[in-house]
Image: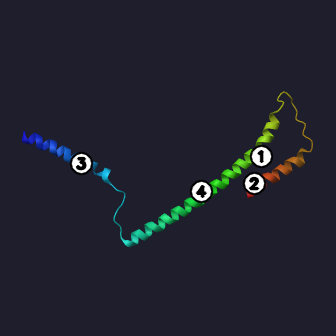
Amino acid sequence: MADGMAIIVRKKMAKIVLDDNEWDFGFSIVDENELELVQQLQNEKEAAIGEVSGNVEALQVKMYTLYKMILPLLNNLKQNPDKSYIHWPNRVSKIDEFIKKLDKVISE
């Protein structure tokens, strides 16, 4: 009976030892040099994240602007699908003007 109880106790102790990872509080011991390096890397990471976030926001604005510029053109082109030809007087000058606007959005 004592052997059976000892086995049960060992199994419970093994489970407790295996579950020790649940009690990891997320810190470790480092020396001063390691701490400075970790802080430097953290600062560099935060700066990079801020830069990327700004770039993403700027690109989102550009994408939305391009969408709003191109959508009216596409809507006009799909009007009257039963007609084979599109009457578009002065299209070269209008297209050139539109290209300049697109270039301006992209270069900003």
- Determine the CA span between mark 1 and mark 2: 10 Å
- How packed is label 4: few (under 14 Cα within 10 Å), some, or many (20 or more)? few
Pick whichever of labels 3 and 2 is earlier in the sequence. Answer: 3
Q: Residues within 10 Å of mark 3 (few under 14, many from 20)?
A: few
For the residues labelled 1 and 2, say whether their Cβ atoms are less than 8 Å apart.
yes
Q: Residue furthest bottom?
A: 32
Q: Is residue 5 left or right of residue 98?
A: left
- Front one among 98 and 72: 72
Counting from the top left corner in percent of width and height, residue 83 is at: 86, 29
Residue drawn at 70 percent across, 49 percent down? 63
**Residue, disc 2:** 105
Question: Under tag 4, what secondary structure?
Answer: helix
Q: Residue furthest top?
A: 82
The amino acid type, in three-letter code, at marker 4 is: Ser
Q: Amino acid at mark 3?
A: Ile
Numbered badge on residue 53:
4
For marks 1 and 3, the one nearer the N-term is 3
Q: Does residue 75 sit above or below 13 in this rendering?
A: above
Q: Amino acid at mark 1?
A: Met
